[in-house]
């Protein structure tokens, strides 16, 4: 008589259940943000981030596991300042060079200066960075790291972070001049743009995970994340204003 299959280890079963719950919550938020009322993420983001933290704490994760420990606040702040300065320098070079300047021509960010400031300093931090850092570099990274170690934690978090960007990148090839020129504007171009966005954000996720690991704080990853999005948005809005003035 053949032996019955071995039951999953309790910790493995628990991990899968928790990961499934987090992924389902994030998928629902992603769809709601894409197809729901404008700025749905601005309301849902902080609320869902709080729910995920409570879920993680209920599962036994510590504040240190989540990157929210007070002990790592100062190292996180140092890394955060360095990250923002590094992104500002890279963007300044990118704008100065004619070859890379088209990458900042994005119709999604043709905003009035006041709207650009509001988006960069309110919508991006609360509607994007807060939830994504709590979810991917906090809860998911902490859960998988607790059960499977740092390497699997970074890979899992980053792959899911890449997939998270499928819906937001559906119009990327028509919205961004550089991307449209590279991949085309048809269906094939859209597919290539989405695949490129997923791959790029997954690699960016690995960088953010490493920054989170080295600093021990979500503050460092959140600062790099905000600088990449927020400063890029401000530059794109400024270029659009001068271009069409």
Image (cartoon, rainbow, N blue to C red):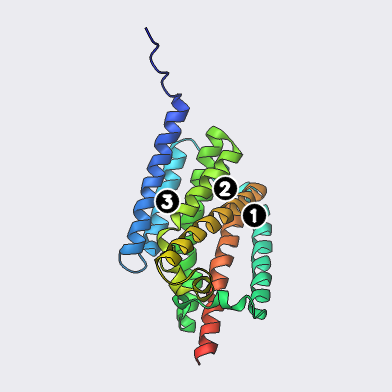
Q: Answer with mark 1 or mark 2, whichever residue precedes in sequence.
A: 2
Q: Are marks 1 and 3 in contact (CB under 8 Å)?
A: no
Q: Are marks 1 and 2 in contact (CB under 8 Å)?
A: yes
Q: Is residue 215 left or right of residue 57?
A: right
Q: Answer with mark 3 or mark 2, whichever residue precedes in sequence.
A: 3
Q: Answer with mark 1 or mark 3, whichever residue precedes in sequence.
A: 3
Task: Check disc 1: other Cα within 10 Å, few if <14, some if 14-19, many if 20+.
Answer: many
Secondary element at image label 1: helix
**Which residue is label 3 attached to?**
50
Secondary element at image label 2: loop
- Point out residue 79 in the picture as x, y percentages from the top left corner: 67, 57
Between 72 and 11, the residue placed more toward the observer is 11
The tag on residue 76 is: 1
**Which residue is label 2 attached to?**
67
Is residue 63 visible from the viewing direction of this image?
no
Who's the residue at 60% across and 40% down the image?
A: 151
């Amino acid at each position: 008589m053949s032996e019955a299959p071995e039951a999953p280890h309790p910790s493995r079963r628990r991990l899968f259940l928790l990961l499934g719950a987090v992924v389902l919550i994030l998928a629902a938020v992603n769809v709601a943000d894409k197809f729901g009322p404008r700025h749905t993420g601005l309301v849902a983001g902080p609320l869902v981030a709080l729910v995920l933290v409570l879920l993680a704490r209920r599962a036994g994760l510590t504040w240190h596991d989540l990157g929210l420990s007070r002990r790592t606040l100062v190292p996180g702040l140092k890394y955060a300042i360095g990250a923002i300065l590094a992104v500002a320098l890279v963007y300044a070079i990118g704008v100065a060079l004619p070859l890379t300047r088209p990458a900042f021509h994005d119709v999604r960010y043709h905003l009035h200066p006041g709207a650009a400031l509001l988006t960069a300093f309110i919508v991006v931090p609360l509607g994007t960075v807060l939830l994504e850092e709590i979810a991917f570099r906090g809860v998911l990274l902490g859960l998988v790291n607790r059960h499977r170690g740092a390497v699997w934690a970074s890979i899992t978090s980053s792959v899911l972070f890449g997939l998270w960007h499928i819906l937001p990148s559906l119009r990327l090839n028509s919205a961004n001049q550089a991307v449209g020129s590279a991949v085309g504007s048809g269906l094939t171009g859209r597919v290539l743009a989405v695949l490129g966005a997923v791959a790029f954000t997954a690699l960016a996720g690995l960088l953010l995970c490493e920054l989170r690991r080295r600093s021990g704080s979500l503050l460092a990853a959140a600062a790099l994340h905000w600088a990449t999005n927020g400063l890029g948005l401000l530059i794109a809005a400024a270029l659009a204003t001068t271009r069409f003035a």
